[in-house]
Amino acid sequence: MPQIGEQAPDFKLQNQDGEWVRLSDFRGSKVVLFSYPRAGTSGCTTQACGFRDEFPKLQKSSVVVLGISDDPPEDQLKWKRKENLPYDLLCDIDHKVLEAWGAWGEKSMYGKKYMGTIRSHWVIDENGVVQDVQIGVSPVESVEKAVAAAAG
């Protein structure tokens, strides 16, 4: 899992349109990368729409926003369109990136344990260095803390 002050590990994932995106494509810009358990669910929509609503402020500071989950491209595209999300949603179907970044682990719902995406975010500076890491953060706190770290 990348720590604050470390170089963010590069990855290559498909976005909601099936196009390949690399984290390193955004060198020279700050990046907010946020993970969410499932496209279209209430907490995830709160988080994603929070970043959507803060997007103009982030854009003014040249910050790129990327969402990531283990949802397939078609689910990501449907959700992006429904919520009018102005940024890419990345598809980590085999959850290898989520695991490497510390956002995949055991969860519990109604007493049943399962493996899944842990709501988190990372802020990466223009040189690819991690500036903020929040694993297991609430939807609202994720937006507040990431925007504060990225756009000041």
Image (cartoon, helix red, strand yellow):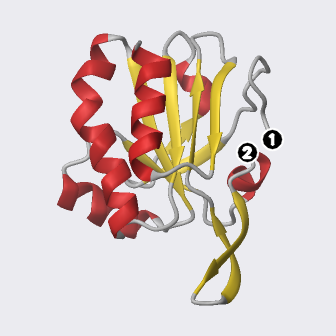
Q: Which residue is mark 2?
A: 101
Residue 66, disc: none
* 34 relative to 62, above or below: below
Residue 25 locus on image (x, y percent):
55, 24
Quarter of the image that includes the N terminus? top right
Front-lying residue, 43 or 92 = 43
Residue 56 locus on image (x, y percent):
22, 23
The residue sitting at 47% across, 30% down in the picture is 146
Residue 32 locus on image (x, y percent):
49, 30
| Three-letter amino acid code at the position of disc 2 | Trp
Measure the C-alpha gap from mark 2 to mark 1: 4 Å
Mark 1 residue element: loop
Mark 2 residue element: loop
Asked if disc 2 and disc 1 are in contact, CB closer than 8 Å, the reply is yes
* 145 relative to 112, above or below: above
Q: Earlier in the sequence, mark 2 or mark 1?
A: 1
The residue sitting at 41% across, 12% down in the picture is 152
Query: Is 88 displayed left or right of 59 in the figure?
Result: right
| Three-letter amino acid code at the position of disc 1 | Met
Q: Quadrant of residue 88?
A: top left
The residue sitting at 38% across, 68% down in the picture is 74
Q: Residues within 10 Å of mark 1 (few under 14, many from 20)?
A: some
Q: Which residue is mark 1?
A: 1
